[in-house]
Amino acid sequence: MRIKTKLNLGVGLLFLMIIILTLVSAYYIFSIKKDTENILKANYNTLEYSRNMILSLDEPSMDGAETIRNFKENLEKQTLNITEPGEKEATDNLKKNFALLEKNSSNEVIKKQIRQDIFMIMKLNLNSIKQKSDIAKHTAETANLWIAIVGTLCFLIAFNLLINLPNNIANPIKELTLSIKEIANKNYSERVHFTSHNEYGDLAKSFNTMAQKLQEYNDSNLYKLFFEKKRLETLINNMHDPIIGLDNEGIILFANDEALKIIGMKSENVIGKSASSLALSNDLMRSLILKELAVDSQKKQPMKIFANGKESYFDKETINITITPTGEEKEINIGDVIILRNITLFKELDFAKTNFIATVSHELKTPIASIKLSLQLLQNEKTGAMNEDQNQLVESIKDDSQRLLKITGELLNLSQLETGNIQLNIEKSDPYKIVNYATEAVKVQAEQKQIKLIIDADENLDDVKADSEKTGWVLINYLSNAITYSSEKSTIVIKLKKENNQIVFQVIDTGKGIDARYKDKVFDKYFQIPGSQKSGTGLGLAISKEFIEAQNGMIGVESNLGLGSTFWFSLNV
């Protein structure tokens, strides 16, 4: 229970009991007052009237006009103040006897009778006074009892509050004060343990969080902090990759020597400055702090920077740094670290590999073409007849040379793509012609396996913005793969449709499909699905992806193991 609620309940209950005590006291005081006033009004006045009448009766000259007038006045007042049982009869007798006395004022018998009537009236009122006094006494005793009961309850409640409430408030404060003294004495392991869920519980939680943070600060003293800071700076400066650290407001916290070298600025002009303000005058800084867009269809290109006296290539990585403060649950962002990994050596090796592949592929095309020409001459009957074994050898050499020619063509295409020397002839292209061209190219290959090619194309499709030759090459590659991995006498569907201002080309086969583990890798260079027949280089789909993306298109595959595959690409209308 909250301390405020306890105080409200305790003080409120005490206040209520005080009100009840006041009301009970007021009620009984009013009752006693009423009884007292009743005695005074009803009985005391009658006794006063009776006393005056006896005094008048005892006057020596009873027959005097003034004496009779005084007696008659008191008798009339008594007649108006009859309150007790029997008092009326006694008063009436008094009036009759007084009337007789007025006629014979010297008659002592009548006077004696009048005195008896007056004494009767006085006796009745004295008895009434005694009864009413007993009633008032009983009322006073009852009042004392109830006032004592209510007062005792008030005392018990006040005593309970006096004993418990100060302890309830003071003890936690005392414990907290002792803990604060321990913290002041650098005993940061001190903790306060309040199990109650009230203000002191909240205060204890905040105090413990403060003590925990102070303990962390104490454990990491200035010497350690300075030493670790120096060690960290040394490590960062000795790294060969440029590194820049920013806080959550974009202020540059550190930059190693490699970073300062490629930026072309001094440390004092960079550290503590806003990266945004530096970007206004430094193009490289502007490109470094730009947020990269996550586009799945486009691979991130390395940054080309003139460094170390030559064109160098860097792979930029921005690492967002978040922490969870002590005593809190929510993570907060404290800044970013920009790392530029120098991949110049790998890029140069890649260029060398690409040039080597291009040179070898180009040099191989001439002897392969010569081999094909020689095979054609051997198969010509004019050069002489061959036996069956010789024909089989020639066919085998012909197939191998054709495969070698295809491989060298793919390697040349790949080298063109990697060096950026690919030439695209983007123009309005008829999607129907592209499909017909591709199906005609693989028609013989499909007939050899008795595979049926079906074209399912929507009518009145728009032209596409594409290089028809390269697009046809991609579609032929799709169809060749589909024929290779489809069973004999099966069906392959070439579907053509429009979706969202794009024309979608699909090749749907009923082969064994692709395992979900390998779907994201089929467009990688040199990748071949484990367990499949190794009839190619694994470059066809990679080159297809480069061709389509170079035309601002998209490419992909949908496949389930055992249910066939659907290879597709889309181009803008």
Image: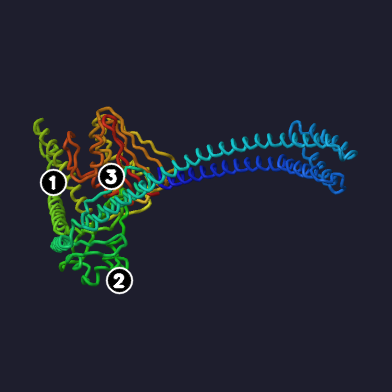
**What amino acid is found at the position of numbered circle 1 in the picture?**
Ile
Residue in the foreground of this view, choosing between 221 and 467: 221
Q: CA distance from mark 3 to mark 2?
A: 45 Å
Q: What percent of the width, then of the height, locates residue 332?
A: 31, 53
When the figure is inspected, residue 492 is found, relative to residue 76, above or below; the finding is above
Q: Are marks 2 and 1 in contact (CB under 8 Å)?
A: no
Q: Secondary structure at mark 1?
A: helix
Q: Secondary structure at mark 3?
A: helix
Q: What percent of the width, then of the height, locates residue 495?
A: 36, 38
Q: Residue at x 17, y 33 (%)?
A: 531
Q: CA distance from mark 1 to mark 3?
A: 24 Å
Which residue matches tag 2? 281
Disc ID at residue 382: none
Q: Quadrant of residue 133?
A: top right
Q: Residue at x 53, y 37 (%)?
A: 145
- Residue 240: tell me if it is visible: no
Give the class, few, some or many, for how many residues have Cα within 10 Å of label 3's Cα (few <14, many ≥20): many
Give the mark nearest the N terminus, 3 or 2.
2
Q: Quadrant of residue 140?
A: top right
Which residue matches tag 1? 368
Disc ID at residue 474: 3
